[in-house]
Image (cartoon, rainbow, N blue to C red):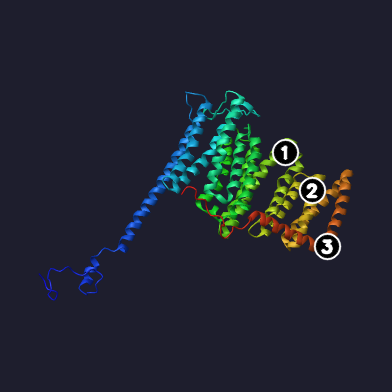
Amino acid sequence: MRLPHQSDDNAQPPPPEATSPALADNDRDWPHHEEEVPETRSTEDRVELLSRILRGLGATALVASTTVFLVQRWQAGNDIQRYLILLGYSALLPVVAFFCGLRIREEKGARTLLAVQLATVPLHFAILGGLLYSQFACDNPTSVIPAFALWVAPSSGTAVLTTVGALGLLVPISFVAFLVLARPAASSLTLAALAANALLLLPVRSPDLVAPMVAVAVVVLSLTEIRRWRRYASLKTLEGRLARSMPWIPVALLIARSLRMYDISSLFQASLLGSAAFVLFVVIPSELEDKDAQVGCQAFSTLPAAASWCLVVDVVIGWLSLPRDATIPLYAVPYAGLLVLMSLATRGNPSRYQWAAVALATASVTANVLLHPSVFSSLCCMVIAVGCLCYGFIAADRVLCVGAMASVLLGLGYNVYCAMRFYSLSSWSGLAVLGVGVILAASLLERKFASLQEYVRCLRHRFARHARGVAARPTDAEPDVRVMG
């Protein structure tokens, strides 16, 4: 038995909280949570990366399975039965997504499933369009359609009922998916996606009819993208960008279908090039942050725009059988006007576009008089050159002034020659009308120059505002919906 004043050699050491110096070395051997944090974080990061990879693989497998189902020809059953199987499979994805979010409490997987569901909606519309086309075709393309792309309904009533039933299921599923991925713009994104997908339902396949549909869809989606969807900060995240890309999928599918299965016409090529030019000039620069990249992208858009207009002119000349002295101005002058419009909305120096427009117009009408001399070509040369001369003086550009004056004198001289040699009433009347018009234009320019300049400045500001869109809000007042968590 030990007395209180006696010491015990077998006594336990004091706890680590004691301030004994002898315990300072032993304190290093005690486990510290701080030393375990890097390893724990590293493990968590690897698990998160693995989960992200697995989600990506799963999404790829789902999209691939739907695509294979689209092109696979089965021997058993008809096309309606095949599509109902696909529709049931697609209806199962939202159920699995809600199970993942509500029961497993993991919202990333749920959002991935809903995003995959949205991406496969255009495939449904493509199949429904094939079923409707088999009964209500409005054209007769000469191309041979591959067997995997043939979807035939047994009757017109069956095609309509299948389409209505599928829409009754796909529309609410799409809205819920957009509500989860991009709540602030869920309504507008749903309407835009359904409108774009509706183009796949139209029973037309001719590239000449598909071309204006593609052009209108690209313009409307681009303007909506800039003026509406980019106002929300939440739509600039990865999920927001995915949601914004969904309305573009049916347009891409429409283009791919025409390129793969039908003979491409000049009008369709012009539509594709014009749409590409519009996207390069309006949409892509608003996504770029570098000023030089924005200016370069807009400058590059002039090339597909020029090719698109040349193809359109080829089609117009073939339809109307225009005379030779009208072809060169028809190629160059409207495109010069397009360059002027682009100068009003460019992010770079507008004078470069305007200089190119004036130089192109002057050179084209001059070449037209030299290659195809006629009363019409000379009058056209004088009218266009006078306008270019006015711009050259206002811009104080000596090269443009000299070139435009030379074109005016060339057109005037040939018109006087025709009037004196052939005694043509058209030559005399054309000169008289042109002279009166030039004098009136000079008076108007001198009297209203300040007002005209202010009008042009306001017009440029309006074009630039619509092209660049509304600036994004610094913060998004509406948080992302969390129905899955």
The residue singled out by tag 1 in the image is 317
The residue singled out by tag 3 in the image is 446
Mark 1 Cα within 10 Å, few/some/many (few <14, many 20+)? some
Q: Which of label 2 and label 3 is nearer to you?
A: 3
Looking at the image, which residue is at 63% across and 35% down? Answer: 207
Give percent across and percent down for residue 222: 62, 48
Q: Quadrant of residue 350?
A: bottom right
Give percent across and percent down for residue 168: 58, 35
Q: Is residue 132 above or below residue 18?
A: above
| Residue type at tag 3 | Glu
State if disc 2 and disc 1 touch (CB < 8 Å).
Answer: no
The residue singled out by tag 2 in the image is 380
Q: Is residue 374 above or below residue 406?
A: above
Q: What is the secondary structure assignment of the residue under circle 3?
A: helix
Q: What is the secondary structure assignment of the residue under circle 2?
A: helix
| Residue type at tag 1 | Ile
**Tag of residue 232:** none
State if disc 3 and disc 2 touch (CB < 8 Å).
Answer: no
Q: What is the secondary structure assignment of the residue under circle 1?
A: helix
